[in-house]
């Protein structure tokens, strides 16, 4: 059986590039949203002429669809992901552009009839509307407010949540509720067609999975390092060894909106 130190070292060594979570198989699990984002994405892309995937990660989700429109573009802010995304989207002739999460999108007005984004770090609602053609749609699965808060609170102590949305024309990694997502979309001039929200059970079966998750999803515990949280990680390891998996809940929000 692996020791605590072995598991720490393993979790710290796994590469974090891209959004492929296959390493977690058998070590952590997360319930999937009932709406099936990949299926909805495939249906929308089969009808589209030009699609933009904002903050594509390694392009894994977009590359999973069977049919793509003639024009495929994507943005990504993290340099290690860029080449992964370019390889994954090459089958569609996709263009991947490095763009900061809060920056304007480097595309002309009304350039796409479909804009998509899965778990964006930031949503620039004003820019989404600008690059959409009239009648074009935006489909996004977003991280809901308080996602995986159980793990954040365990390591950092209980967090106080502000009851008020952050100011500005975008939603950040603090997460969004269905109400806030709808308000921001409508404020940007989009018509909301569908909005849903779900809490989904997650289980972490060993401390290596916790460490790798926190290194990969950096907003759960900002500034996380193994050394800084070694004592709490040791306590959590002991808990899982004696009582089974650590349970948390991810929050997900689906929104689909149209430019009139």
Image (spheres, grey):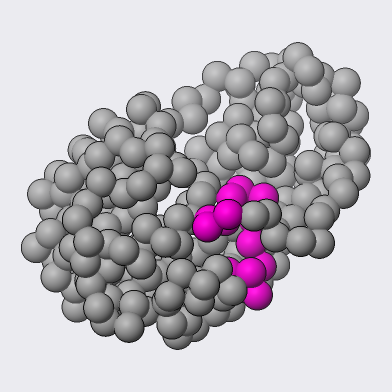
Name the residue: 55% across, 19% down: 13
Please state if 128 lies on the left or on the right of 46 as rendered: right
Up/down of 146 relative to 209, above or below: below
Which span is picked out in magenta? 168-181
Left or right: residue 72 versus residue 64 is: left
Q: Quadrant of residue 205?
A: top right
Residue 170 versus residue 244: which sits nearer the camera?
A: 170
Which quarter shows the N terminus? Answer: top right
Q: Position of residue 62 (x, y in %)?
A: 30, 56
Q: Is residue 60 visible?
A: no
Q: Residue at x 72, y 35 (%)?
A: 221
Position of residue 29 measured from the top left corner of the image (x, y, whole percent): 62, 52
Considering depth in this image, is 22 or 59 the residue closer to the camera? 59
Write the residue at 31% across / 49% down: 105
Residue 112 against residue 47 in the figure, above or below: above
Measured along the vertical axis of the image, is residue 161 above or below residue 5?
A: below
Quick check: is 223 in the magenta stretch? Answer: no
Task: Provide residue 190's location: percent of width, then percent of height.
Answer: 42, 76
Q: Is residue 104 left or right of residue 208?
A: left
Q: Is residue 171 magenta?
A: yes
Which part of the image, by quadrant, shows the C terminus? bottom left
Give the residue drawn at x 46%, y 69%: 188
Q: Is residue 132 visible?
A: yes
Residue 6 shown left or right of residue 233 in the figure: left
């Amino acid at each position: 059986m692996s020791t605590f130190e072995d598991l720490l070292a393993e979790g710290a060594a796994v590469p974090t590039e891209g959004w492929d979570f296959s390493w977690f198989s058998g070590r952590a699990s997360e319930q999937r949203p009932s709406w099936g984002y990949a299926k909805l994405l495939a249906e929308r892309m089969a009808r589209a002429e030009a699609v933009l995937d904002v903050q594509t990660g390694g392009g894994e989700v977009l590359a999973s669809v069977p049919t793509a429109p003639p024009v495929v573009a994507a943005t990504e802010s993290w340099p290690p992901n860029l080449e992964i995304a370019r390889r994954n989207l090459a089958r569609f002739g996709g263009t991947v552009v490095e763009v900061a999460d809060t920056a304007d999108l480097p595309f002309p007005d009304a350039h796409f009839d479909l804009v998509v984004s899965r778990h964006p770090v930031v949503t620039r609602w004003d820019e989404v509307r600008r690059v959409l053609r009239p009648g074009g749609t935006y489909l996004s699965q977003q991280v809901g407010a308080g996602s995986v808060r159980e793990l954040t609170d365990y390591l950092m102590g209980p967090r106080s949540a502000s009851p008020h949305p952050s100011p500005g024309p975008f939603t950040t990694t603090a997460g969004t509720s269905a109400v806030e997502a709808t308000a921001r979309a409508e404020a940007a001039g989009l018509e909301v067609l569908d909005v849903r929200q779900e809490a989904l059970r997650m289980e972490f079966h060993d401390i290596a999975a916790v460490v790798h998750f926190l290194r990969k999803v950096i907003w759960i515990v900002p500034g996380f390092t193994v050394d800084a949280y070694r004592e709490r990680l040791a306590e959590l390891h002991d808990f899982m060894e004696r009582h089974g998996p650590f349970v948390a809940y991810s929050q997900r929000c689906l929104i689909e909106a149209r430019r009139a």
